Amino acid sequence: MLVYVVRRLLWTPFLLLAVTFITFVLGHYGPGDPIKVMFGERVNPEAVARIRHERGLDRPLFVQYADYVWKAIRGDFGESFKFRGQKIGELIPQKVLVSAQLGFVALMLSVLIGLPLGVITALRQGRWLDPVTVSTTLFFMSVPGLLVAPLLIWVLVILLHWLPSGGWGGLLDGRIIMPAIVMALPGIASWTRLMRASTLDVLGQDFIRTARAKGLRESMVQFRHVARNALIPIMTVLGLSLGTLVEGAFITEGIFGIPGIGRLAVDSLFARDYPVITAITLVIAVSFVAANLFVDLMYAYLDPRIRYR
Amino acid sequence: MAVQKTRIQDALEAKSRGPWGRAWERFRHKKIGMATFIIIGVLYFGGLFAPLVSIHSFTAQNLMEAKQRPSLKHPFGTDRLGRDQYSRVVWGIRTTVIITIASVLSGSLLLGVSLGALAGYFGGKMDAFLMRIGEVFLAFPGLLLTILIAATIKPRVVEIVRAFEDSSGIKGIVASGFVDYVVVFTALSAFSWVGTARMVRGQFLWLRSTEFVEAARAVGASTGRIIFRHLLPNAISPLIVSVSMGMGGVAGSEVILSWLGIGIQPPQPSLGLMIFDNFGIGNISILRNDPHLILFPMALITIIMFSWNLLGDAVNDVLNPRTR
């Protein structure tokens, strides 16, 4: 356990360095010379040299990178191209707050629907529910929200008038339901599939037979022994689901006009607002690394086979 | 005199067909596998021969005929500029075909197989180095790295291609939209090589220690011969499985990139662009008035993605010794 944790913790700083470096280089030098990107081709060379020096762009790449990261740690990501004078560091937290609320609801939906559905289908193997669930979940896993959202909007909003179609009113507003469903669908599908596979795995093990043999009630076997043990391997997916949520946020917030980090990213992509794109990527990638580290450590804590290796 | 086939003859025949013949035999009995195989075959064939399959030009506008419902003249209707939707869908599929095949060739097959083979065969420091690089790429969630690459490298690619145009005297590469294709499939390959490399590495690590490879080494086979004659052919069936399972995802990523405005640019046709044209950011009014405008591109890309995933499942059933 100790060796595993130490190795994991030692590797993380390198991972963070590499991830931030790739993001920095792509964001600042990917499109070409930053000054030309900022001011166009026809600027007088003296002004270019002066601005280059003022902004520290004449320093070596690694110095600029270190400077960028050092400022980023303290929340300073520079200025947006599109909104001159707007500090990106002030823009991001409020957007993250909106996306976090939406992501939280979507994650809750996918866990609360996916896990029970997975256990139930596994226990009903061989009846109609199982193949139906398996094929439906495969569909929602293979097709992105961009293709599911219009269908849902068409049915729920335009045909049935059940739900409002877009906008944002916070966590307790009805308008959160549609985007949350769209974002949750791939999650529900993957949680169901994993939980089903995991439950089937546990069902075949000896201690389940023992539990039944000693006369435990079937409901007790299913809750205490099957479901609880099936949950352990599922833990790893929690970290990955952050990735699904981010991908979903780009599309869903774009479609439904939700003022979150995904919408900001989409708008910046269209405006070619590179500093904002870079800052968003950096924030998301770093939180993804942190989430995966957390899950890995949790997993080691929960699963004795890793702990003692 | 009629010759009766015996079981033994059957068995001998099956054996003479070789492992691929037998795999095909098993595959032929999978209904879903065959159905999706045919669907994908038809769509890819249609996409490749788009100039012949389409009935109108995909750019020709006719404002007198804008936003028509499906009819005999325009089977999928027309969009708000009066362009024939059917022809645009066919050309859009062609883009999907080009992008999926190019990304698989460059990302999975070229990069993934060669790096995975290096890591798996030589092991040691080479392996550790390559796998750590792979981990760095996987540290970006979902499509994020792809989006970042596609969003940032385009001006630079245009610059390089312009320089090439100037020095070689060949004109019109930038204008032809070729650059967008390069940007999209570069971004997609940058992400997709990792999975393939890991898989090939795993296969090589295992095969390297098998007896037949040891025997080949004992009789003095060269490194190149061992890799190409003994290791690679044995790693091909998991490779086919992972490629066919990944194709749907690649197709979907192109659609998302184009929808986000960093993929294929108009006037080049793409299913993602067609969806964006009518169902853009924060604009859902199209669903109220003319849902058929996005129905066809969405249906087609959904069919392509779902078919690839089902096909991947079926191929996995046939080729994976554990599920067989």
Image: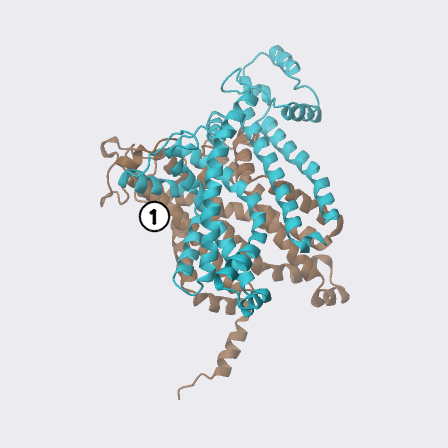
Give left or right: position of A17 versus B40.
Answer: right
Give left or right: position of B14 versus A135.
Answer: right
Using the image as rendered, state which of residue A133 and residue A138 is in the foreground: A133
Local packing at callout 1 (Cα closer than 10 Å; few below 14, some 14-19, many 20+) is: some
User: Tag count in the figure?
Assistant: 1
Quadrant location of the N terminus of chain B in the rendered image: bottom left
Q: Position of residue A85 (x, y in %)?
A: 53, 15
Q: Position of residue A104 (x, y in %)?
A: 49, 38
Residue displayed at 35% across by 42% down: A152
The answer for which chain carries disc 1 is B
The answer to whether residue B82 is visible is yes
Above-or-below relation of B165 to B5: above
Q: Which chain is cyan?
A: A
The amino acid at mark 1 is Val
Q: Residue furthest bottom?
A: B1
The secondary structure type at the circle numbered 1 is: helix
Residue displayed at 28% across by 38% down: A161
Residue beneath disc 1: B53
Q: Which chain is brown?
A: B
The answer to whether residue B85 is visible is no
Q: Position of residue B52 (x, y in %)?
A: 35, 47
Using the image as rendered, state which of residue A249 and residue B199 is in the foreground: A249
Q: Position of residue A248 (x, y in %)?
A: 47, 39
Q: How is the image coloured?
A: by chain
Q: Give the quarter of the image for residue A18.
A: top right
